[in-house]
Image (cartoon, helix red, strand yellow):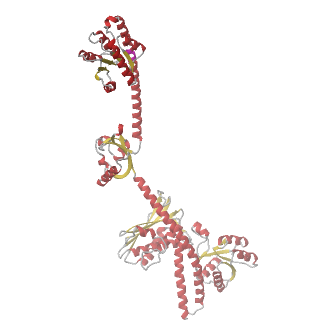
Amino acid sequence: MNILIVDDRDENLYLLEVLFKGNGYDVQSVPNGAEALERLESGGVDLIISDILMPVMDGFELCRRVRANEKLCHIPFIFYTATYTGPQDELFALKIGADRFIQKPCEPDVIMGAVRDVMTIARSKEIVLATESAHEEEILKLYNQRLVRKLEQKMLELEKEVQDRQKAEEILKQSETRYRFLFNSIRDAIVVVDTKRAVIDCNPAFVDLFGYSLEDIIGKETFMFFANDEALRQVENEFKKYIADYRFLYKVDFKKKNGAVFPGEVNIFYLMAEKGILKGFIGIIRDITERIHAEKTEKDLESRLHQSQKMEAIGRLAGGVAHDFNNMLSIIIGYADMALTRLNPLDPLYNDVLQIINAGERSADLTRQLLAFSRKQPILPVATSLNSLIENRLKMLGRLIGEDINVKFFPGAGLWNIKIDTSQMDQILVNLTVNARDAISSGGIITIETANVDHVAEDSIIAQGEYVMISVADTGKGMDAETIEHIFEPFFTTKENLGTGLGLATVYGIVKQNEGFVNVYSEPGIGTTFKIYIPRFYGEATEKIEKEQTSNLNGKETILVVEDEEIVLAMAKKILSVYGYKVFEAKTPGDACLIAETHKGEINLFLSDMVMPGMTGVDLQKKIHKIIPDLKTIFMSGYTPQFIAQKGFIEENFNFIQKPFSVVALAQKVREVLDR
């Protein structure tokens, strides 16, 4: 059996063809009623299945003409439609001669059942021409009504379709606007490329970063943005590595339009179409120059922090060792001094005792350097003009360094004053210039410069503030990074069999004690520069006036000596007694207070150790002064008291003698204070 399908939609034709051919029928198809009539003229059609609404000629007209044609009226006719159907349409279809009216969609079994029923009835039914069985005028009237109604429905549908399309277009336009706004607003550079990596689009951030306009690069491959061949190879390797991923991240060097190269971080996303088809790539590029700089700075800061913490720990250890060692040296030097006074210079033992004193004093110098490193060296800071101080020391430095090395001094104009112990500044100058001398060969140059520095804290190495900078640079052999890392550690030295390794440790301790900073810059074969920053002092420079030494060191005054080390206490008493003083000994602060309260006579001087069990010398002084208000005081210590450790300096009126001290030094200090 041969079935003719009339429908203007390919998908409907396809489904019916598959259904009927699958059930053993021959199938032909046409898109409208006019072509159906032409096909029917050639004969051989056993069944017509038609849609209603079609171009050129609709299904109703086709059915009327088939039923009015005596050659075709015998062919069964089935309407199969989904467009504008209703009870009146079905009645009209049957009135004009249709054998069956089926609404889409329906099950295949329903269609096949209708076909079988219609064919069975057609074989037994008497065929009557439509012109004889129906009133033509009535049919035309109904047909016109159906067409008008369907036209109205079609117009409404078209109007709704237009509205829906306009709404969809508006939504699409809004979506496109939002997309473009976001695309243009993102501050990371974005580039869109096809599968060959030719540029399709880019955002303004990309233009700002690379310097190209979209017109400059559209259609061009992205290879032009990479810094060099190595960067290109890296990119290709990344693509091969992540070929199965829909997103991946890598870092590579890029090149701007002006040739500048910068490190970038790239996020690559695959641009996929429907059914998983790759249409291109989206690259999000970020300049990570600042991040790399920040990471390096953070790493440097962390390294410096670790170094500072290590130096702090070594400093505390050095300070403790120096304190105990100074107590022992006080005993050695003190008793050796007293023994020397009893010996005739011609005595064979005289030189031996003198060597003991000299060795003790050299040992004391080492402990002073340790104390300077640990920031516990007693100091008497004064307002100072650094330019004047250096000018006065240049001849001395020249003698230390030698004639074969040239020392140049470039004083900064309008240099601010600083407040520092001038002996400490002497230590800094001597240690740095001697180190420079040892690093350079004959004919080298040492350059000393000063300048004002108004530092804004971009990092935490040097705090924000105003500083006076002193720079000591040499043209010597320089140092590598590993050496620089250790140069401020005590006892570290690069001089074979020379030096103690305390010179730079002393400089470090002095600078930190004065709330300053030190930086070193050096490269092997180039030279070394030390830059020291001391806080500015807002005040006029003053000259330190040395009081003339009293020639007669003897006295008859009464002195209260407080010292928890018995052997040091005994030595101090013996020295003072030799010079004629009356001495009261106290091993503890409690003993000292008891003596002050119970002694009926006058006590003229209070000589106390700074650090003792249970109470500091400063606290003890306050208690003693409540008992004897006008009592003069001298403090002694192997290292400074808690006050100095916290504040970093001693007030100008603070009387202090550093252990170890000689017999004469103690006698001079006592006489100096008593005579004020």
| Position above or below: 302 against 345 | above
State the quadrant of the N terminus. Answer: top left
- Most extreme residue toward the left, as rendered? 42
Residue 262 percent coordinates (x, y): 36, 52
Measuring 48% from the left and 66% from the top, which residue is drawn there? 307
With respect to residue 158, does 203 lie above or below? below
Q: Position of residue 617 (x, y in %)?
A: 65, 72
Q: Residue furthest front?
A: 124
The image position of residue 578, as x and y in percent, is: 65, 86
Residue 646 location (% of width, % of height): 59, 66
Quadrant holding the C terminus: bottom right
Closer to the camera in the image, 215 or 533: 215
The number of discs equals 0
Is-magenta flag for residue 152? yes
The quarter of the displayed image where residue 12 is located? top left
Q: Is residue 328 above or below residue 6?
A: below
Which corner quadrant of the image does residue 197 belong to? top left
Is residue 248 shown to the viewer in this render? yes
Majority SS type along the magenta span: helix
In this view, 555 is above or below 54: below
Magenta residue span? 150-154
The residue drawn where x is 50% and y is 65% is 308
- Indicate yes or no whether the magenta region holds residue 144: no
Q: Identify the image quadrant of residue 144.
A: top left
For residue 668, side relative to residue 64 (left or right): right
Viewer-closest of 411 and 184: 184
Query: In the image, what residue occupies the spot 55% across and 94% down?
Result: 347
Left/right placement of residue 137 relative to residue 602 reads left
